[in-house]
């Protein structure tokens, strides 16, 4: 099947590469000429495990191509995936300018029948806006082209996106039941047939419900994270081990273990903006989502917890103190720094006069870029950050080690060497990677999240 993907970010590039891997003829459009040139020359603009191999092999066999030519991209695919960004607007709502621009281009150039698939995360009612934009463009040039807009939200986890796409636990599709909608549904059913050979993974529904499902899923996951973080903070006060609690409640099949890990807050491109966008949608209908408002507030506060623990241990004025920081990306297996907890922690420590040596297995270049933006008007503060290529070297002569991202490389360090490198054998573990009892036996002062009962 001939497929066009509009946008080569996480969603677009993974979707295009994986559909090409299944034998489809895929053309990816991006208006960023530099990104397209990078992709055509064998580069990858993002870090996503396994994606580089799939892109390379399908570029080589000709099933995956990249272009900046809008007309060519619209002409190519019967199926047109819109997979562009929907960044938060100033009021927290999803900015649809790129989605609607993609729709406008489809309407401007299309000939014959097209299935337009909203893959981007968009508010309820977006498909209707996309349809109107396309219809207006077709009418303006007095063409007779037909189309149907389908909602097919993505459920890809950064760091595991390729596996999530190729082995989905569900495929949500919202479509209309009119003549064109049924025609589009048949095409999409054929497109996703390879994923349904063992058992049916597709959930068909109306378009608005499909759009809402994506936001509901991310809101639920964010809620579980903030719920556990709030309990972890209370656990520190009342002498409870939050890890024991996690096992205790996670064993209940009605609850399960997923997304119940206490830590220093969630980040990334999805949860923060999707929670805000859903809240904004509710306000437009004079509804107040009290739980989600609390979820967001808890997460903002949670990103400050590790810094507060450092201040409680070393004092309000951190001038003259030097810290090692392991983990910069918002989660492992990605270089994504959007809304990363490390940015909040680092800004707080720098503001109080500290210096830091930082390490991340893959996000160093992206961290340099975002920190330059964060401290654009304070170059003297940016100078207090030193990027180190080896985690043990980062710990050299540090007054404490701070862990923000749960990369596997940090899970089993040489603790004897680590202790010897640190000026003070103190660890602030924002992801509860280590056991407090083990640290006590090694003579390391340990501060986790919701685990203080085991260090008293």
Image (cartoon, rainbow, N blue to C red):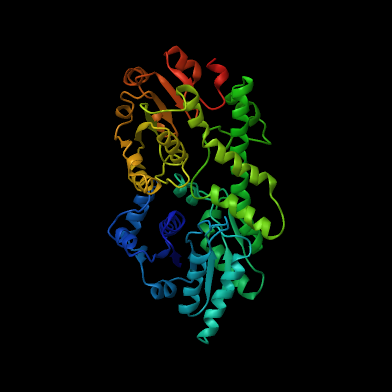
The quadrant in which residue 172 appears is: bottom right
Residue 134 visible in the current orientation: yes
**Residue 319 percent location from the top left of the image:** 38, 28
Depth order, front residue of 384/165: 384
Number of callouts? 0
Image coordinates of residue 236 in percent, x first then y, are: 59, 24
Is residue 144 something that shows in the picture? no
Taking depth in this image into account, of 195 and 109 the one nearest to the observer is: 109
Does residue 336 lie above or below 421 as drawn?
A: below
Residue 142 appears left or right of 384: right
Left-right relation of 238 to 48: right
Q: Residue furthest right?
A: 286
Q: Nearer the viewer, residue 9 or 304?
A: 304
396 up-or-down from 349: above or below: above
Question: Who's the residue at 54% across and 75% down the image?
Answer: 134
Q: Residue at x 66, y 36 (%)?
A: 255
**Residue 375: x percent and y percent?**
38, 45
Q: Is residue 133 left or right of residue 446?
A: right
Residue found 42% across the figure and 46% down from its top: 336
Q: Residue furthest left?
A: 41
Q: Dividing the picture into quarters, in which one does residue 187 lie?
A: bottom right
Work out whether 365 lies above or below 357.
below
Q: Quadrant of the C terminus?
A: top right
Q: Position of residue 98 (x, y in %)?
A: 48, 65
């Amino acid at each position: 099947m001939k497929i066009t993907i509009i946008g080569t970010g996480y969603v677009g590039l993974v979707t295009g590469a994986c559909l090409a891997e299944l034998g489809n003829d895929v053309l990816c459009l991006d208006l960023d000429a530099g990104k397209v040139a990078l992709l055509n020359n064998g580069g990858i603009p993002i870090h996503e495990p396994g994606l580089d191999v799939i892109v390379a092999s399908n570029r080589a066999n000709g099933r995956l191509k990249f272009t900046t030519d809008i007309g060519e991209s619209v002409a190519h695919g019967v199926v047109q995936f819109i997979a562009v960004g929907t960044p938060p607007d100033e009021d927290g709502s999803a900015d649809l300018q790129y989605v609607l621009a993609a729709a406008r281009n489809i309407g401007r150039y299309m000939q014959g029948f097209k299935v337009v698939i909203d893959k981007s995360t968009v508010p309820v009612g977006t498909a209707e806006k996309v349809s109107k934009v396309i219809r207006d463009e077709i009418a303006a040039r007095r063409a007779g082209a037909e189309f149907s807009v389908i909602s097919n939200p993505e459920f890809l986890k950064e760091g595991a996106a390729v596996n999530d796409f190729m082995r989905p636990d569900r495929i949500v599709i919202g479509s209309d039941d009119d003549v064109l909608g049924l025609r589009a549904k048949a095409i999409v059913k054929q497109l996703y047939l390879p994923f349904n050979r063992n058992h049916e993974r597709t959930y068909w529904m109306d378009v608005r419900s499909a759009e809402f499902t994506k936001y509901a899923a991310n809101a639920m996951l964010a809620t579980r994270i903030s719920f556990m973080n709030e309990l972890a903070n209370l656990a520190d006060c009342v002498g409870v081990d939050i890890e024991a609690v996690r096992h205790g409640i996670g064993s209940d099949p009605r609850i399960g273990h997923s997304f119940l890990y206490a830590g220093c807050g969630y980040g990334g491109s999805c949860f923060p903006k999707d929670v805000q966008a859903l809240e904004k949608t509710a306000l437009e209908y004079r509804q107040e989502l009290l739980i989600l408002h609390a979820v967001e507030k808890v997460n903002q506060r949670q990103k400050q917890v590790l810094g507060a623990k450092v201040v409680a241990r070393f004092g309000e004025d951190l001038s003259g103190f030097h810290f090692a920081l392991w983990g910069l990306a918002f989660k492992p297996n990605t270089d994504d720094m959007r809304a990363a907890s490390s940015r909040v922690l680092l800004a707080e420590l720098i503001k109080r006069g500290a210096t830091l040596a930082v390490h991340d297995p893959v996000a160093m270049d992206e961290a340099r870029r975002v920190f330059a933006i964060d401290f654009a008007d304070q170059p003297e503060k940016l100078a207090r950050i030193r990027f180190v290529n080896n985690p043990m070297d980062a710990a050299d002569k540090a007054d404490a080690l701070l862990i923000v991202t749960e990369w596997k490389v940090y899970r089993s360090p040489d603790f004897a060497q680590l202790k010897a490198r640190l000026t003070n054998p103190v660890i602030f573990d924002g992801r509860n990677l280590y056991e407090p009892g083990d640290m006590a036996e090694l003579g390391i002062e340990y501060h986790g999240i919701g685990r203080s009962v085991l260090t008293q």
